[in-house]
Image: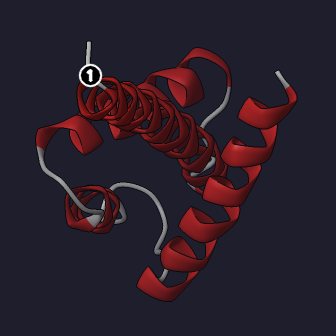
Amino acid sequence: MSTFEKREEDFEAKFAHDEEIQFKVRARRDRLFGEWIAAQFGLEGDAAADYAKSIVDVSLDEPGDEDILSKVAADTAKYRPVSREDCLAMLQQCEAEAKQQLMSE
């Protein structure tokens, strides 16, 4: 194996690892956000856990956060309003928390 092939293999392995970490961070962030929004809606226990899971599931459908924000906006009709700005701020906080949790594992 040449030096170039070894470097290419190493780069591909690092890329795959980074993508896996990014996926785990996003999934954890979405769960944490789902738990927070469930609390904002007054959901507890299994209902809160189910709602958090639904946020993770919706997030897997499309890249970006618009699908999550659209779901929350639609669900405010059933529960109580939560502003888009509050949701965006909490998504950032949840992402930081998710990264910290994964780094400490």
**20 and 35: which is toward the camera:** 20
Q: Residue at x 50, y 87 (%)?
A: 85
Given the current orientation, which residue lies at the most extreme right position? 104
Q: Nearer the viewer, residue 63 or 21?
A: 21
Task: Please identify the quarter of the rendering in which residue 56 is found.
Answer: top left
Question: In what quadrant of the picture does the N terminus appear?
Answer: top left
Q: Residue furthest left?
A: 62
Position of residue 31 relative to residue 87, above or below, is: above
Q: Amino acid at mark 1?
A: Ser
Outermost residue to the front: 2
Q: Which residue is found at the position 78% from the left and 35% from the top?
A: 103
At horizontal 55% and vertical 64% (from top left) the residue drawn is 91
Q: Is residue 3 left or right of residue 48?
A: left
Give residue 93's quadrant in the image. bottom right
How crowded pointer 1 is (Cα within 10 Å; few <14, some 14-19, many 20+) is rated as few
Residue at screen point 69% across, 46% down = 99
Horizontal relation, residue 10 to residue 77: left or right: right
Residue 84, above or below 5: below
* Image coordinates for residue 51, horizontal then vertical, percent: 44, 33
Q: Position of residue 37 (x, y in %)?
A: 56, 53
The picture places residue 58, in percent across and down from the top left corner, at: 23, 40
Which residue is the site of mark 1? 2
Quadrant showing the C terminus: top right
52 horizontally vs 67: left or right? right
